[in-house]
Image: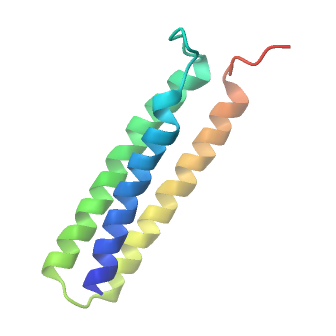
Amino acid sequence: MRLRLVLLGIAILAAIAAAYVLHIRWLGFPDGTLTELDRAERALFRCAAVPGVVIAVAAFAAARWRTSDKRTFWVLAGATAVEVLVVMAIDIALRLACDHGVGG
């Protein structure tokens, strides 16, 4: 069970890094202009990364101190799933409400 907790923590940190490298870093137009949606998504990333790091640290700590507590793994995995669903719902709401710079 300790391995699962360590892998969960690594997966969370990898997902945060991938979200930054693949999406957040490339927001905006080449001249540096950010749309309303871009600014909102950057703020959402900052707000979502903090609980993700906290959950990952909790997974590492649980792997260090508890050897075979299955409940700990499922609580942390559930917290991760809830965080992902909440962030996705907020992102969808932002995409519907904010100006995203598409003209036509």
Measured as percent of width and height from the top left, residue 36 is found at: 59, 18
Most extreme residue toward the bottom is: 68
Taking the image as drawn, is residue 43 in sight? yes
Residue 81 on image: x %, y %:
50, 64
**What residue is shown at x 30% (from left), y 76% (from top)?**
5
- Judge by depth and name the residue closer to the eye, 86 or 25: 25
Quarter placement of the N terminus:
bottom left
Tag count: 0
Query: Going by the picture, which residue comes out furthest to the left?
Result: 65
Tell me if residue 72 can be seen: no
Query: Residue drawn at (58%, 16%), measured in percent from left and top?
Result: 29
Name above or below for residue 40 compared with residue 66.
above
Q: Is residue 82 above or below residue 87?
A: below
Residue located at (68% from left, 32% from top): 95
Residue name at image x 51 percent, y 41 percent? 22
Q: Please provide percent x and percent y for residue 97.
A: 69, 27
Quarter of the C terminus within the rendering: top right
Residue 82: percent from left, percent from top: 50, 61
Instruction: Give the colour scheme of this rendering.
Output: rainbow
Residue lying furthest right:
104
